[in-house]
Image (spheres, grey):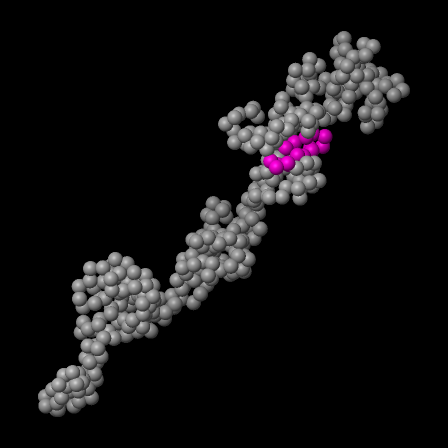
Amino acid sequence: MNSDSNNPLDAEIEAALNGMDLQSMDATAPDPSDPRSKSKGSPGLRRGTVVGVSGPDVFVELGPRDQGVISVSEFETTPNVGDSFDFTVGRQEDGLFTLSRREARELAAWNDLDIGSLVKARVTGVNTGGLELKIGPLGAFMPASHVSLTREDDLSKFLNESMLCQVIEVAAERKRVVLSRRAVLESERDQARSSAADSLTVGSVVRGKITRIEKFGAFVQISPGLEGLLHVSQISRQRVEDVEAVLKTGQDVETLVLEIKEGGKRISLSMKALEANPWDEAQGRYNEGTVVEGTVVRVADFGVFVELEPGIDGLVHISQLSRDRISRVQDVVKNGETFPVRVISVDAMAQRISLSRLDDSGVMLGSEEAAAAGDVRELMNKTQPTNLGTNLGDLFKKAMGDGAK
């Protein structure tokens, strides 16, 4: 990978190294300018054939006019005449080049490194910008942002640790190998997520732990690498204004899987779906004409939503708030206000209840006028029809009290 000042990774590495020479971390990388680098496809290597073994020395034919010598100790077993190996070529003495297989193996390691390949590396040093590592004898670097899935404030805890990494840059001419542990962890997480997601089905009940809370809901870890979103609207059948007031980080919760998308990358969960639905019995409890107490939970331009019980809200349309004409709902009703309402209609299937602050005669519920009218109705119901004509005036006087005299 060539240097590019516009490459964010390259800029991060340069800033992290803060002037440190990567070549000082590893001196075994090939030098393309070396005239002895004649191996096909392997800069810095020469292919040679053993032509003789004499005591501690192995003689190698490098070409028609080039011969070299290498110590037999650099071989696992004494080689045979005719065996071929890769060598690095040193200085020439008495007509023979000094050869090395150890350096050849190191150079071969460089040549075998490809972007995307996985390597085992050991952390040998720490600086403010990342980690210094060794892949065998080769030096490498890992930017701080590639050490973990989350920000690591203390990189020193990784010192001397061996870790599986992915090669994200190889630049032999700059003697640079850049590694990423985060890429490996992300791959493992995605595999774990995909595997866990395959076992999930919409409608299944799962247990999980709250890992993070936001204004819009909470994230729930279902299994390692697999998280779902519990939206604020799915926490409870009761209205939830503040998520942190009902859920805590680390809390175990039981949820229902509502939706699975993108191979488990997006999972929607619900706690509300596991609660008993109060609307199942709403039709029987809230008959038309029933008067109940309710609390205003939301004010809109067209009316107010009134909570009759946890999970059941009804709408009082602006036309049903007062017998007088209302221009602005906010001028007559406030959030949290409690007052009696009359049920106009109930649609349990659609989970809708229409309410009114007026009785069936158009009088404001709970007012003195409504109380007086109620007394009149009660007295009229108790009075025999034969006495209705003669006693009607007295009934009204009694209902209205002294104010009617």
Q: Is residue 371 above or below residue 355?
A: below
- Rendered location of residue 332, percent (x, y): 24, 64
Does residue 205 appear in this view?
no
The C terminus appears in which quarter of the rendering? Answer: bottom left
In this rendering, position of residue 145 left or right of residue 358: right
In this rendering, position of residue 33 left or right of residue 239: right
Residue 36: quadrant of the picture = top right
Residue 234: quadrant of the picture = bottom left
Q: Nearer the viewer, residue 344 or 3?
A: 3
- Rendered location of residue 13, percent (x, y): 58, 31
Residue drawn at point x = 38 percent, y = 65 percent:
311
Does the magenta-highlighted stretch encompass residue 138? yes
- Rendered location of residue 86, percent (x, y): 74, 21
Residue drawn at point x = 24 percent, y = 62 percent:
331
Does the magenta-highlighted stretch encompass residue 188? no
Does residue 173 appear in this view?
yes
Q: Residue furthest left?
A: 389
Q: Residue furthest top?
A: 65
- Rendered location of residue 400, percent (x, y): 17, 83
| Count of labels in the image | 0
Residue drawn at point x = 47 percent, y = 62 percent:
246
The N terminus appears in which quarter of the rendering? Answer: top right
Which residue range is magenta in the image? 127-141
Q: Is residue 49 above or below residue 12?
A: above
Q: Is residue 200 above or below residue 94?
A: below
